[in-house]
Amino acid sequence: MKGRYQHWGMRSALGLLLAWGMPAVCGWSSPMPPARPLRVVTTIAPLYSFVRSIAGETVELSNLLPPNAEPHDYVLSPGDARRLADADLIIRNGLGLEGFLEGVLAQIDRSKLLDASVGIVPLPEWTPPGSSSARGRAGGAPPNPHVWLDPLNAMTEVETIAREICRRDPEKAREHRARAERLLALLRRIDDRYRSSLEPLPDKKMVSDHQAFAYLAARYGIRVIAFLDARGHAGLSPRLLAWAMAAIVRERVPVLFSEVNQVSSELASLSRDIGIPILPLDSMESGALRSDLYERVAEGNRQALVRAFQGHAATQP
Ligand SMILES: [Zn+2]
């Protein structure tokens, strides 16, 4: 069986190479094509959006988190466990985002589990300057898992996902690859737009209650003042909040950024006390399940950032 399997894989890969000369598209050994559509389960909405864009309607695709659910405190349902068991391919972000999978990993066939973030160097979680939480931990702060917010990282995730879908569905690999190329070109244009609209704006600073936006800050020259993010933590200490308040005033931070529809009480208090507005950004992790989620949300985020920093530039002496 193994010999036949490998023989088929070689012939298939050679056929693909001869037909369209794209050696990097699909693997050299491909599993037997399934008789039914590939069953793919993603964990969060941006990954769903990538798979839908790459595979169109040719796969049976479902997402574990329903719209408006948050990965940081999600709990698997019995229906989720069934979907995971029935899936041919499970695509998660990785880097610790999907803590809700930990309890079932022992029962999952690891060969069908793909980490979309593989190959991306993550940022560490933000910790306040001089804080002991990072110093005391072996290896430093844990990784910030929200890599997809940076469009260039999103391109790496799309490459990883496209390669795996091609490998598992070689008969339709050519169409998957063509759609993946269109998505990669779109992500490149999104990065260009961010860059051309944000780079000319001076003195960009970020305070937010969701660490997800650290990836936008790092890519587009926005200086992080503080992430007051209680997700996955025991809460924010009064000392940290006092430090953040002083830093926001000292640095003349013009706006605070919050996850859309999830303003934390701490950020709301700071906004009231200091008298600066809160603008929503969207991490997509609780987003709608649609193929164009990424481009729609990325554009909304870009406009919010430009509005925040343009307004600030106009009020500077
Ligand atoms: Zn998050």
Image (cartoon, helix red, strand yellow):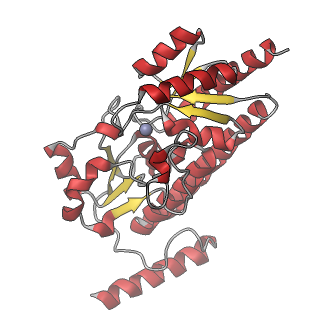
Q: Residue 53's x, y, as percent? A: 49, 46
Q: Residue 307's x, y, as percent? A: 68, 19
Q: Seen in the image, is 120 located left or right of residue 113?
A: right
Farthest residue, direction left: 78
Farthest residue, direction right: 317
Image quadrant for the N terminus?
A: bottom left
Q: Is residue 253 visible?
A: no
Q: Please tell me whether residue 171 is drawn above or below residue 8 in the rendered image.
A: above
Residue in view at x 65 percent, y 19 percent: 249
Q: Please tell me whether residue 150 is drawn above or below residue 18 in the rendered image.
A: above
Farthest residue, direction bottom: 3
Q: Residue 125's x, y, as percent? A: 50, 46
Number of marks in picture: 0
Q: Seen in the image, is 291 located left or right of residue 32?
A: right
Residue in view at x 38 percent, y 35 percent: 231
Q: Seen in the image, is 171 located left or right of residue 77?
A: right
Residue in view at x 54 percent, y 54 percent: 122
Q: Quadrant of ligand 1?
A: top left
Q: Is residue 221 visible?
A: yes
Nearer to me, 209 or 54: 209
Q: Residue 6's x, y, as percent? A: 39, 85
Image quadrant for the C terminus?
A: top right
Q: Please tell me whether residue 103 is drawn above or below residue 21 in the rendered image.
A: above
Q: Please tell me whether residue 258 is drawn above or below residue 136 in the rendered image.
A: above
Nearer to me, 84 or 169: 84
Q: Seen in the image, is 36 located left or right of residue 157?
A: left
